[in-house]
Amino acid sequence: MRVLRLVHGDPRAAAELVARLTGRQAAGLDPLPAEPADLAPETLRAHRGDVRALPDATRLVLLLAAADQYPVATHAFLRAVAAVRLDTRPLEAAEAAGIAYATAGGVGFRDAWTRIAAYETAAPADRREAHRLLARVLHGPAEAPRRAWHRGAGALGPSARLAAELTAAAARARAAGDPALSGALAERAAALCADSRERARLLAHAAADAWHSGDGDRARALAARTAADALTGVLALRTGHAGEAFDALLAAAVRAPRHPARGGPQRPAPPAPGAVRAPSPTAHLLARAAEAAVYTGDLRRSPEALLVAQQLGMEAPGVLGGLAAAVDGRYEDARDLLEATAGRCGPGGDPTLLLHAGIAALMLGDHPRAVTAMVRAAAAARARGVTAAVSQAMEFRVYAEFWTGRPRAAEAAALDALRQAYATGQDNGACHLQAALAMFAALTGDDDLCRERAAAARSHALAHDLGLPAALAQWALAFLDLASGRFDAAAAGLRALAASGPGHGHRAIRHLATPHYVEAAVRTGEIRVARVAHAGYDRWARAVGGADDLALSARCRALLTPGADALEHYREALALHADGTRAVERARTELLFGSALRRLRRRTEARDRLHSALAAFESFDAPHCAEAARAELRALGAPASPVRDHRSPTAQLTAQQLLVARMAADGATNREIATRLALSPRTIDHHLRGVFTRLGIRSRIELVRLLADPADE
């Protein structure tokens, strides 16, 4: 996907580039090429030949148009033409050759490669003159950054004056939320800077801007030319070896300025009620270090970051304080610190700290507040032009959406976030989303997809020290076994979550999966270990006081209690679930309660509970869990016929199936669909067979007709 974006959507150029990638580039360990000549030399060579065949006057017009369009679009072509009374009639030769054409705003090129070729075939002196002309016709404060760009591009060599002008313009663009423009300006300033230290600083700014604008590969290529710990840490966390992120971010936090560089310490304006105040550079880096501990699963390192914050005389940012307290077993302190962080989820503010507010809410089991925080984090990121942070917010939002009984909506959102993560070079975020999608597949009964997603997530996680997605993928596989009645396999898989080292497991996921482990362990006779696991879970549940955590603890207690004495614990669990939000777990509690009632021959109450569980599982489209409820009803001698589905045919499809179906109806091949969704062609074939079966059709032609019917949209 990223290769296709780099070559401007040209499939032939993409194939050419893929064949030239090194093993490390293909594995995502090194940045992809970023310069046009490095991307697809054969493609570019052919386009240069087309341009060179044009008359000199035509090439001059095309040069001016190309210089006006990339990498900074300045929309000054027509003004430049008028200023020098340039004759544009030679453009007819380019139109006749199919290379370019006149538009209302100037010139349109056949494709991006033609634009690049039109610029690069010109002599350096002609390129500089084109940029100087464009700079002369750009006027007013709003056009100052683009004027500075052309002035810098027209320079003969290093210039401290132009570098300073470009640096100031980059700062203004950055403050205005246009990281793509600020990055281009900073990179040009670095090219004109003679001082090596200042040049490295400007390149670091350009790399950070490229990252924020969603161009992860460009960010990594620029970062390779500098040695900034902050940048190294962020890139390692999101796209590299996450185990290296914590140390780099902590080192950068120690050296970070305590106040903004320009103007010295300033008193910030009061934030809106509930808003997150913009953090200092140090606080921002310490928050990122806390994220590194979360993603790797090495939570024991969070006290190190907390100690740095204390030594610097500052309040621990984000979830850092709560994590450190939880690691030390101070659960009441952890609750208070996480509650304070979760409360900072008002509109506006810094995307990173809004993200932390959502993570804190998740740890407290407050899913509605987690969703609110993540939605606002994504909105704040978009408003600031920080594209890279949008998919990261979705990574954690899907947890809340899943357990609250909206797995289909969560799956669709996760698929969209997965595409964003891959497109922006956030391979570690994509790994996390693959693991989440494995959990969705486990609940919705797609065994093959669950295993494929989990395998992909675990493979990447192991190579990049990512404990969080590794543990989540392991939980997905175990939940699939549990829902399918394979209790020995489920217990073994959940027991494996005890491994909490980076790249293998995660303490938080192990905690979240404890109710499932207790269920599997009781089913396999491992009562002693089930009691030990429940004791730790119950201590956290009582300290935090969340309704769902207390409900699940009561459910565990019921499973561990023999005979009729278990029923009161089940009733307590359902009463607590009524005040909670985890609809999926409530349905599972009803299933277990109904099963216990059946064994005790309390037929009427058992039937009611099992029918309620069955209806919930069918609404979640969770076939394995629904079948377990039907089996209990059959054992009870009660009817368990499936509910008639009056929805439109396409409403019967999962989010993944509907997405595949629409792509297939648009004419995409299985291989093309697989590439776009980061799956194997075999899995796409499996999905299409499932689509055809559910819709009762036999061909793609019937699929096109069905999806074209407005009644089914």
Image (tube, grey):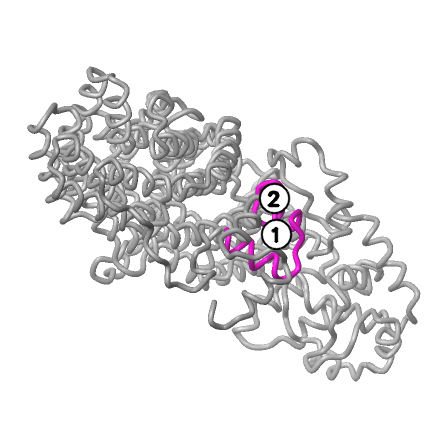
Q: Which of marks 2 and 1 is nearer the N terminus?
A: 1
Q: Mark 1 points at which residue?
A: 187
Membership of 182 in magenta stretch: no
Q: What residue type is labelled 1?
A: Glu
Structural crowding at the residue carrying mark 2, measured as other residues with C-alpha within 10 Å and reported as few (<14), some (14–19) or many (≥20): many
Horizontal and vertical percent for residue 443?
37, 41
Q: Give the range drawn in magenta.
A: 657-683
From the image, state whether disc 2 or disc 1 is nearer to you: 2
Horizontal and vertical percent for residue 459?
52, 29
Q: Residue at x 65, y 74 (%)?
A: 75
Q: What residue type is labelled 2?
A: Leu
Horizontal and vertical percent for residue 660?
55, 53
Q: Residue at x 47, y 60 (%)?
A: 650
Q: What element carries label 1?
A: helix
- Quadrant of the image occupied by residue 685: top right
Q: Is residue 505 left or right of residue 559?
A: right
Q: Residue at x 71, y 53 (%)?
A: 7
Depth check, front residue: 278 or 579: 579
Q: Is residue 572 above or below residue 495?
A: below
Membership of 673 in magenta stretch: yes
Measured in 3D between alpha carbons, the distance from the residue under mark 2 to the one under mark 1, in whole angstroms, is 9 Å
Q: Is residue 502 above or below residue 134?
A: above
**Residue 629 seen from this side:** yes
Q: Is residue 421 left or right of residue 297?
A: right
Q: Mark 2 points at which residue?
A: 222
